[in-house]
Image: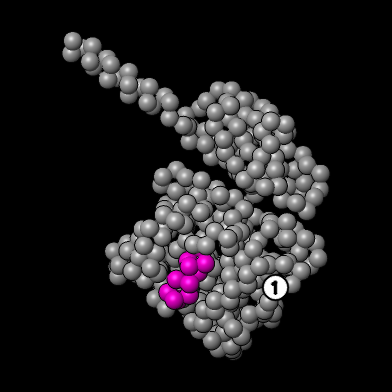
Amino acid sequence: MLNHLKYLFLLIIFSACSSSEPEIDIVCEIDNTPDYILKWDISPVIEGNVKIYSSVDPQNFDTENGLIAECPISDENIRIHTNPTIARKYFLLRFDDKYDRIVGTRSQQFNFVQNFRDLGGYKNYDKKRIKWGMLYRSGKIDSLDNESIQRMKNLKIKTLIDFRDSQIFTLPPSSLKLENIIHMPISLYPLDMLEEKINNHEFKRGDACVFMQDLFIDLSKKATTTYKSMFNQLLMPENYPVVLTCSYGKDYTGFAVVLILSALNIPEETILDDYLLTNQYLDKRSIDLNLVDFPLDIQEAVTALMTADEQYLNCAFKYIKRQYGSIQNYLEQELNMTPEKQKRLQEILLQ
């Protein structure tokens, strides 16, 4: 009898394990062809085919008549040829007719815009993922050319939240037809004073690193009113899709995204990875300073200012955890993001 119960117990455990969904990670890239390259990694390995569907709306796919490609799951990648278009494409991958995953390119290229990217696809501790096409981060978008305006209009963004200081804030093109332009200025240091130090060759790489570490700590201490207001806007479903911007989409926007991802219960490792993507999508040559004739140490200092460095963000994390015990406590105590509000935000942004 005891052996029979032991066998039954093992059978139940095995059945539960075998019926659970595999871990499926997908990357979508686009080359200059322009072709989309879809790559996937599955653990444990499963057999069968992957069916691929395409849409310009990440929430709606025609899975009855819209099949565009099919291949064995074991291929691990596929190239999708598409005709050149200004519309952004998303893909639904159906593995073995059981498991669906939606993916798009992380970055969308716009002329005269730095560091624009979609926050979709990131997975939280509960294995839910951020919806694609709902929340974007970017550098300033007030210098778009006509082609880029059309590309951005196709994203159907409703709300712009801009964190730039009032002295450099500029309205985006009216032709974008944004419903809400919300200026939430963060003014932690005088920009003209920093520029003067650089021009006078009084700002070295070490100064820049200390400056950036202090900036992220100051954001967590002194920008709480702004970030609290940001969350109030993000808790309104009618505001989406939303884009968060500052000059380069790096610091004020970067810390805003850290807070949002934390409220969505995204792992800290993923949050750090997203922060560091700035180094891939920000062209440091776009800075509004001509550094050609500057000494090398000054150029290195400016490069440090324009770099997303792990130590900058870690300084803020250490400060918050030392003062509040955890990021969650900070969200509740300083930004009024109660567990109920975090749950509401997750209901809006996760699937």
The image quarter in which residue 321 lies? bottom left
Quick one: 308 or 185, which is closer to the camera? 185
- Region rendered in magenta: 223-234
Q: Is residue 229 magenta?
A: yes
State whether residue 104 is above or below residue 224: above
What secondary structure is the magenta-colored segment mainly?
A: helix
Residue at 21% in and 12% down: 3
Task: Please tell me how crowded label 1 is: few (under 14), some (14-19), or many (20+) other residues with Cα within 10 Å.
Answer: some
Image mark count: 1
Residue at 58% in and 70% down: 161
Q: Amino acid at mark 1?
A: Pro
Q: Residue 79: percent from the left, percent from the top?
A: 71, 37
Q: Answer whether residue 114 is visible to the viewer in this image.
A: yes
State whether residue 132 is above or below residue 176: above
Q: Answer whether residue 30 is visible to the viewer in this image.
A: no
The image quarter in which residue 264 lies? bottom left
The extreme left residue here reads: 2
Locate residue 297 relative to residue 68 in the image: left or right.
left
Label 1 SS: loop
Quick one: 12 or 283, which is closer to the camera? 12
Locate residue 218 relative to residue 132 in the image: left or right.
left
Q: Is residue 12 magenta?
A: no
Q: Residue 143: percent from the left, percent from the top?
A: 73, 72
- Quadrant holding the N terminus: top left
Q: Residue 18: percent from the left, percent from the top?
A: 42, 24
Residue that numbered label 1 is attached to: 172
Residue at 22% in and 15% down: 5
Q: Residue 273: percent from the left, percent from the top?
A: 50, 55
Residue at 45% in and 68% down: 312
